[in-house]
Image (cartoon, grey):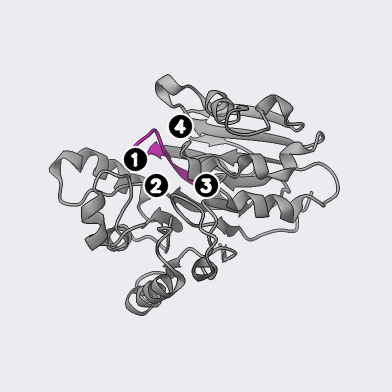
């Protein structure tokens, strides 16, 4: 066990929304779909949020380490871009390894194992759950604060098209909120109760990673799709005294030149408001 670690390190392994995009004009910010790793001080157990295609590179980075690979994967919801990397995560094929997979209940569609079992069938993929060698535990995540190996996890439901978690990680005296799919509804009284709950959940956190797939102009054509305009995310972050804000779930049609220009704008205009602000970028690390 590596007890020498003191900082919490957050690494972006996938930041793209909707579908992976392997175009040359997407490589600076990354073409892999959502995956986040949180390095927990005091343990080598992995903490992973979502299993989009970015989890493949994460798995490749640890597969050759000696000994058992252990950890937990908290999946926000079962849309393809958040689970499609799961069967390509090499550590789940090692018989000595152990992972717990967490996901909110999906109502009539079932719990965590039901959902993954439905995706990994011979119709869609050659490997089924019963062919995976690692010791896997499937947990339909309760909506309450739970303690794990060096951290706590809580969640509230996002405003999305299926049951979707906004995970809050309590770790080392810090609070990290991971919210890659959430539609902020601005100026709509019908959403006032939800907005109040959301603001209470987010207020003052050390790091907020939030969906900002659109701008306000493009959002008008996509109301109800379950994603936010980055301008509204920044406004919310300022209102709630968020310390560090990173916008993620980039649209597959947003190329590096567009994202770089927006990133520069965020840092120039709001850099003095937040301790850190910017667009999530594949490979980027945040130290808390």
Of callouts 4 and 1, the N-terminal one: 4
Q: CA distance from mark 1 to mark 2?
A: 7 Å
- Residue bearing the label numbered 3: 170
Q: Nearer the viewer, residue 119 or 205?
A: 119
Image quadrant in which the C terminus is located: bottom right
Q: Quadrant of residue 198?
A: top left
Circles 4 and 1: CB atoms closer than 8 Å? no
- Say which mark, if any, is on residue 160: 1
Circles 1 and 2: CB atoms closer than 8 Å? yes
- Residue bearing the label numbered 2: 181
**Most distant residue in the top direction:** 108
Q: Nearer the viewer, residue 167 or 24?
A: 24
Q: Quadrant of residue 14?
A: bottom right
* Label 1 crowd (10 A; few <14 / some 14-19 / many >=20): some
Q: CA distance from mark 4 to mark 3?
A: 13 Å
Of callouts 4 and 2, the N-terminal one: 4
* Label 4 crowd (10 A; few <14 / some 14-19 / many >=20): few
- Residue bearing the label numbered 4: 144
- Secondary element under disc 1, as helix, strand or loop, is loop
Residue 269: percent from the left, percent from the top?
32, 77
Viewer-side label of 4, 1: 1
């Amino acid at each position: 066990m590596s007890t020498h670690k003191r900082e919490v390190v957050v690494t972006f392994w996938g930041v793209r929304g909707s579908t992976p995009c392997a175009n040359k004009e997407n490589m600076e910010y990354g073409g892999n779909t959502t995956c986040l790793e949180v390095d927990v001080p005091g343990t080598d157990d992995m903490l992973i949020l979502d299993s989009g295609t970015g989890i493949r590179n994460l798995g490749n980075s640890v597969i050759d380490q000696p000994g058992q690979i252990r950890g937990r994967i908290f999946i926000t919801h079962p849309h393809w871009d958040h689970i499609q990397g799961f069967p390509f995560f090499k550590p789940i094929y090692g018989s000595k390894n152990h992972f717990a997979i967490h996901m909110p209940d999906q109502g009539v569609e079932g719990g965590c194992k039901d959902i993954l079992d439905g995706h990994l069938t011979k119709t869609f993929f050659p490997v089924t759950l019963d062919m995976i060698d690692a010791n896997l535990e499937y947990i339909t995540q309760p909506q309450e604060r739970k303690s794990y190996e060096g951290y706590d996890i809580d969640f509230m439901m996002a405003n999305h098209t299926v049951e979707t978690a906004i995970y809050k990680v309590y770790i080392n005296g810090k609070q990290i909120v991971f919210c890659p799919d959430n539609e902020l509804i601005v100026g709509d009284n019908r959403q006032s109760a939800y907005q109040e709950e959301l603001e209470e959940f987010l207020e003052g956190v050390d790091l907020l990673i939030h969906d900002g797939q659109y701008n306000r102009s493009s959002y008008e054509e996509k109301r109800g799709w379950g994603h936010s305009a980055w301008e509204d995310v920044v406004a919310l972050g300022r209102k709630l005294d968020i310390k560090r804000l990173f916008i993620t779930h980039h649209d597959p049609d947003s190329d590096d030149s567009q994202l770089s220009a927006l990133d520069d704008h965020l840092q120039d205009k709001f850099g003095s408001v937040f301790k850190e602000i910017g667009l999530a970028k594949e490979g980027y690390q945040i130290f808390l």
